Image (spheres, rainbow, N blue to C red):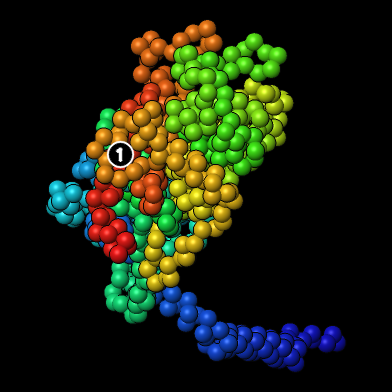
Amino acid sequence: MIHERAIKDHNREIRLFFFRLSFAALFVLMLVVLLLWRYYSLQVLHHQDFVTQSENNRIHVLPIPPTRGLIYDRNGVLLADNRVGFSLSLVVERSNNLDELLDKLDQLLDLEANELERFASLLKRRKPYEPVPLRYNLTEQEQGLLAVNEYRLPGVEITAEMIRHYPVGEYLGHVLGYVGRINDQEIRELDPVRYSGTHVTGKSGIEKFYESELMGTVGYEYVETNARGRVMRLLERIDPKPGMDLQLSLDIRLQEIAYNALGEERGAVVVLDTRTGGVLALVSKPGFDPNPFVTGISFADYRALQDSPDQPLFDRAMQGQYPPGSTVKPVFAFGALESGAVSEDTRISDPGFYSLENSIHRYRDWKKGGHGARVDLHDAIVQSCDTFFYTAGVKMGIDQLNHYGIRFGFGKRTGIDLPSERTGIMPSRDWKRGARGVAWYPGDTVNTSIGQGFMLATPLQLAVAASRLATRGEIRSPRLVSHIEGMEDPPTPPAGHIPGTDQHWDYVLNAMKDVVHGARGTAKGIAKGLTYTIAGKTGTAQVVGIRQDEKYDAEQLAKRQRDHALFIAFAPADNPRIAMSIIVENGEHGSSTAAPIARVMADSYLQLYSQEIADAAN
């Protein structure tokens, strides 16, 4: 009998069922444990991290730009202030289509290429929901157009901001400089935290040199926003700290007088206070109005300034380097006396030229036929005798000429509190070997002795030299800022002194006085009607070379090829209060072109400060 085979193994099925049930229960338990652990991690371990992230999504920190410090002249006249202006900005996240929005704005406002380029640059470094400025200083008409079309311009904002303004315009364009929009290079160099609330920085002049003081400290607002970035309420505010105000030693009245005294000529006028080194006037003409640069000057306007043959953007007072000509003769006269190269009794015969030993080349005197048979150093200064200084310069040698030139401030920066000052050139053997790669020749010394050849000086350096002559050697750096708000005024004692005997100082300074007041002085034309004394020295600087066998003929030269006219002076000569330098480009004669401007400046100063001078005398 065949046993019937069991169809099912119930025991096996029961064991399999319980295995599967246990595995499923264990898997579910593991999932529950993992879920509980994740819940614990989110709600307990990382609770604070997620709370902070959540708050950051709705709480934003907005920078508040500080108010830029003001700039005043010595009498409290406002030279640089801040005015409220309205700017057009875009919040990209609120715009459905940025290109379409820009097209609409272009149709309404006729956007310029430089505005779009600047906007694109700012767009790259913006933060989410941060307004990006497109046009500054909107007119009332532009504001009206934007207001009427607001419904179809999503993302457009009109915001009020303080815009720099320069009330005196071109009179102080080079001195004050201007602020301008931060460019790509500057954004990499400037502190991003400090400049988070502003789009401008000092570009030139006082604005650049004193940027740290004028800038101030940015403030902040903690605001709550909705999902679209719109501010719902203010949570906390930290007020910005305004920049410091500056007071200059400069007198805007003298600045305007000097600027206008140049008339239609190009040139520079520098007036210094001999007692402190303070700059009373620092003029470069033609000037320029810095206001268009603040909000972004158009390409056409900038190109017109840049391409002008008169170079209004060029600061002649600090960056113009001119042969000083005969204005350096008092400096080299003092050096010749101190070094013993000549004495007060030294006399020469001046036939109208000078030749080096064993040379047939003639170095001409400006006066054809010369100044006579017995010319001393006093006559050489008063009548500007080139031949005497050729002789004295060769006896001194270039090393002594360089030594005294450096002492009086030539060939190095004066230390004025402005950027971009140039050094000029006080030549020496080492300088020529390094700059030209050749040795120094005796003829180079001859040319240097009358401020020609390789020698170059800025009008500011000439004024500093005049001040050091006026004060009998006091060395002071010229300063524009006399007081910074919240800080002690810096001391004004001289930083050093040029040694010299009183007899030699008296000799040179009396000769400079006779340049104006002597019967044969080269600047005697400005002495008429003077009730005080002026000491000065005329100068002429060649623009184009004249061959030895040729004669200078102004009528045959274009205006811009004619000689420059120079003059240095200090007044009153017996108790100097101001020292000055004047250069008139292509003005030809210092006596007839530059010296009269010095007379105007001296008259104006003594009239404006008559009461102060009287009080000091009593």
Q: Give, as a three-letter code, the residue at label 1.
A: Arg
Q: Report the residue at 35% width, 48% height from top.
A: 572
Q: Is residue 69 above or below residue 563?
A: below
Q: Secondary structure at mark 1?
A: helix
Residue 361 position in % (x across, y down) = 62, 12
- Where residue 153 appears, as percent x and y from the top left, is 23, 52
Residue 42 quadrant: bottom right
| Residue ranking furthest to the right | 1
Which image quarter is the C terminus in? bottom left
User: Farthest residue in the top direction?
Assistant: 549
Q: Quadrant of residue 156?
A: bottom left
Q: Nearer the viewer, residue 120 or 545?
A: 545
Residue at x-position 57% and y-position 49%: 501
Is residue 344 shown above or below 587? below
Graded by Cα atoms within 10 Å as few (under 14), some (14 to 19) or many (20 or more), the crowding at tag 1 reads: some
Residue 332, image x, y percentages:
56, 36
User: Relative to residue 5, is residue 98 depicted above or below?
Assistant: above
How many numbered callouts? Answer: 1
Q: Is residue 1 above or below residue 608?
A: below
- Tell me if 187 is positioned left or right of 253 in this view: right
Compare residues 303 and 258 and report the one nearer the observer. Answer: 258
Q: Quadrant of the N terminus?
A: bottom right
- In the rendering, at what x and y percent does residue 69 appear? 34, 63
**In this orientation, which residue lies closer to the viewer: 414 or 379?**
379
Which residue is at the front of the view, 568 or 380?
Answer: 380
Image point (62%, 16%), residue name:
355
Judging by the rendered image, the residue that carries numbered circle 1 is 599
